[in-house]
Image: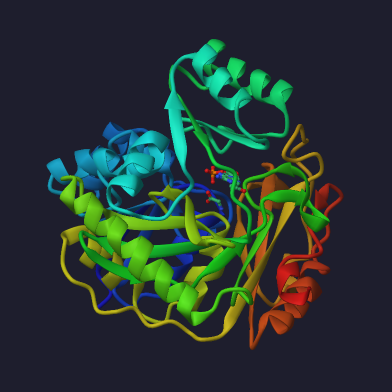
Amino acid sequence: MADKKVLVVGSGGREHAIVDALSRSPQVAKIYCAPGNAGIGLQAENVPLKDTDVEGLKAFALANGIDLTVVGPESSLAAGLADAFREAGLAVFGHTKAATRIESSKEFAKELMFKYGIPTAGYRSFSSYDEALEYVAGRPFPAVLKYDGLAAGKGVVIAQDLEEARAALASMLLDEAFGKGRVVVEDFLTGPEFSFLCFVEGKNVYPMPLSQDHKRAYDGDKGPNTGGMGAYTGLPFITDADREFALESIMKPAAAAMCAEGCPLSGVLYGGLMKTPQGIKVIEFNARFGDPETEVVLPLLESDIYDVFEGVALGRKVEEPVWNDGVTLGVVLASNGYPGKYEKGFEIGGLEQVDAKIYHMGTAFRDGKLLTNGGRVLMVVSGGLDVADARERVYREVAKIRCDNLFHRTDIAHCAFE
Ligand code: AMP
Ligand code: GLY
């Protein structure tokens, strides 16, 4: 019976995909999203509360009889949203602040991986600029420098030479560009990267299909790093044995390690993994769904996502989720200039002709018109029998969208065709 009320926290394409998946659940009667966005507002009721307004969100959930809250962004988790909800007796899908350290503190994650034998790049951590610089100067380049905290994806610098390293270390440790913190210096690894998202409740790990994000702004993986310009499932370079290794030797041990450390996971564990010549290694862990990976992964879920979210939230074992064995591919349409400066307010047309899923990332409705309202604006996602099929379908649909200020990559999933 459809009687459940769900609150989704966040406002991006990821949250739109979560809302979309929940709207397919026969148990869900009402979905709220805080703060949501224009597209989400077509499938849920937007609530004008910030995703880090823990007290406001808790009061809303209590006042509106919310059965389950699903948290998208790491900033909400790092602000202690899940802790506050649990204390108030509210069911919440999302990790405690202590467990979120697997993402919010690079040093915590690195120590955990070394302690429990989870494969990752070698590293050292520094709070002193002089010591960090001396260490980096005595090692081969490129040097991988990571600020030890949440830095909105901007805290990682791959320095090609000493000058670049000096500038990055000065910004992180002397100017404290992201706040006071330490810097982790890592060995430089090579190989294709991929994302392994799993639902995790304590030691129980429920894998989702593997996906790959495209972080650079332009075709050929050129240009500046972005939040992600497209993603797909059905990775051609990962074998069944690779996936098995990643699940058994990385994701499950990480979940067990967090239990042993007294901060069990209860949400999504996202392994940012690399297939190096020495085997699969962890580049980073995230404590949340990836964006734009979620937009290609969740459409493949055939089970009722409410059961999965609720089971994890309540600490119950979940029936193994069932996934469609087709593939998906999604292309992000971003404002010209993104990830740098860009303008907003351009009209978007043609969406009603699009025969694919459209997830909104940064849009607004004004006077009955849909306008661009962010850096990443829309993501178009299509399924297919294989990657080539899905790619052809998506680009055919993307071509129907009219806007004077949007660009997109034309080579999503290029790895599959090389
Ligand atoms: P992170 O935020 O830790 O995922 O790092 C951002 C990006 O920097 C990753 O997606 C990789 O492309 C790159 N990167 C991070 N760590 C390393 C490493 N140890 N070796 C090579 N590239 C890395
Ligand atoms: N797709 C990268 C991220 O969600 O962090």
Ligand 1: quadrant of the figure:
top right
Q: Residue furthest right?
A: 404
The reply, left or right, for residue 330 in relation to residue 155 is right
In depth, the one of 128 and 172 nearer the eye is 128
Question: Could you say where residue 25 lies in the image, as x and y percent from the top left?
Answer: 36, 75
| Identity of the residue drawn at 60% across and 31% down | 139
User: Split into 4 quadrants, where in the image is the N terminus?
Assistant: bottom left
Residue 255 in view, yes or no: yes
Is 19 drawn above or below residue 107 in the view shown? below
Q: Quadrant of residue 332?
A: bottom right
Residue 134, x across and y down, in percent: 56, 18
Would residue 51 be found to the left or right of residue 225 on screen? Answer: left
Q: Is residue 208 above or below residue 337?
A: below
Quadrant in the picture for residue 68: bottom left
- Name the image quarter holding residue 206: bottom left
Q: Nearer the viewer, residue 129 or 11?
A: 129
Look at 45% across and 59% down and name the residue there: 44
Which corner quadrant holds the C terminus?
bottom right
Q: Is residue 222 above or below residue 414?
A: above
Residue 43 visible in the picture: no
At which x and y percent is residue 154?
A: 59, 34
Where's residue 110, x and y in %?
A: 38, 41
Q: Residue at the spot x=25%, y=46% of the render?
A: 61
From the viewer's side, name the closer residue of 298 and 348.
298
Q: Nearer the viewer, residue 258 or 289?
A: 258
Left or right, residue 311 beside residue 362 = left
How many marks do you count on the picture? 0
